[in-house]
Amino acid sequence: MPLSKFDHLDVTGILEDGVHAKVDVSFSFAITSVGMDARRVAEKYVFENDKRKYGDKLAHDFLSNSMTSLLGDELAYLPPSAKTYVKRLSVIFDKYDDGWKVEEHSPKEEK
């Protein structure tokens, strides 16, 4: 079941330099009701499960990675009230005789 769904994208910038161009894009996602429910209870259940397996100290140490594995980087640490999130990317294009093409190593996620 999906925890979030794509909502829309915005091109937030284009920088052209001869035969190269960098395009900044923001992808907006809406968190589904399943995603909201999972975020609400995940930390408690992940911690309790790891605590039974590994003990209290290791459960605390593992919590960050366990939450990211379960919910993904985007959802794991959003504020509880968040209903959307944005992922920003920069995509590099190269110009050829037949038009613009995405560079082989694009897109790059922005932090």
Image (tube, rainbow, N blue to C red):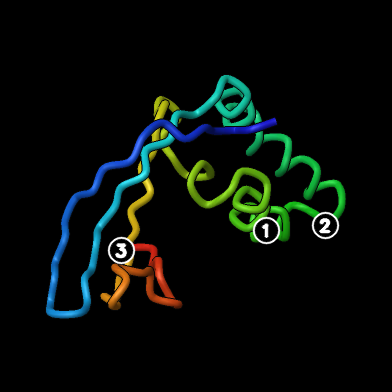
Image quarter of the N terminus? top right
Q: Position of residue 97 (x, y in %)?
A: 28, 77
> Residue at the location (40% across, 70% down)?
106
At 80% across and 43% down in the image, what residue appears?
49
In the rendered structure, the answer to whether residue 81 lies left or right of residue 53 reads: left
- Tell which circle, 3 or 2, labels the residue nearer the N-terminal end: 2
Q: Secondary structure at mark 1?
A: helix
Question: Could you tell me the amino acid type at mark 2?
Answer: Tyr
Front-most of residues 59 and 26: 26
Marks 3 and 2, how far apart at CA? 40 Å
Is residue 14 visible in the rendered structure shown here? yes
Where is residue 98 drawn, in percent x and y? 32, 71
Q: Quadrant of residue 4?
A: top right
Above or below residue 95? Residue 27 is above
Q: Position of residue 101 (x, y in %)?
A: 36, 69
What's under tag 3, amino acid-wise? Ser
- Seen in the image, is 28 located left or right of residue 64? left
Residue under the point 45% across and 29% down: 30
Mark earlier in primary sequence (1, 3): 1
Label 2: how many Cα within 10 Å (few below 14, some 14–19, many 20+): few
- Residue denoted by label 1: 62
Which residue is under mark 3?
90
Cα–Cα span, label 1 and label 2: 9 Å
- Is 14 displayed left or right of 58 in the figure? left
Q: Secondary structure at mark 3?
A: strand
Label 1 crowding class (10 Å Cα cut-off): few <14, some 14-19, many 20+? some
Q: Which residue is mark 2?
A: 54
Q: Residue furthest front?
A: 98
Task: Please give the name of the residue rendered at 57% of the width and 20% of the height, measured from the top-left corner.
Answer: 33
Give the residue type at disc 1. Phe
Q: Pointers 1 and 2 in contact (CB under 8 A)?
A: yes
> In the depicted view, which residue is nearer to us: 108 or 20?
20
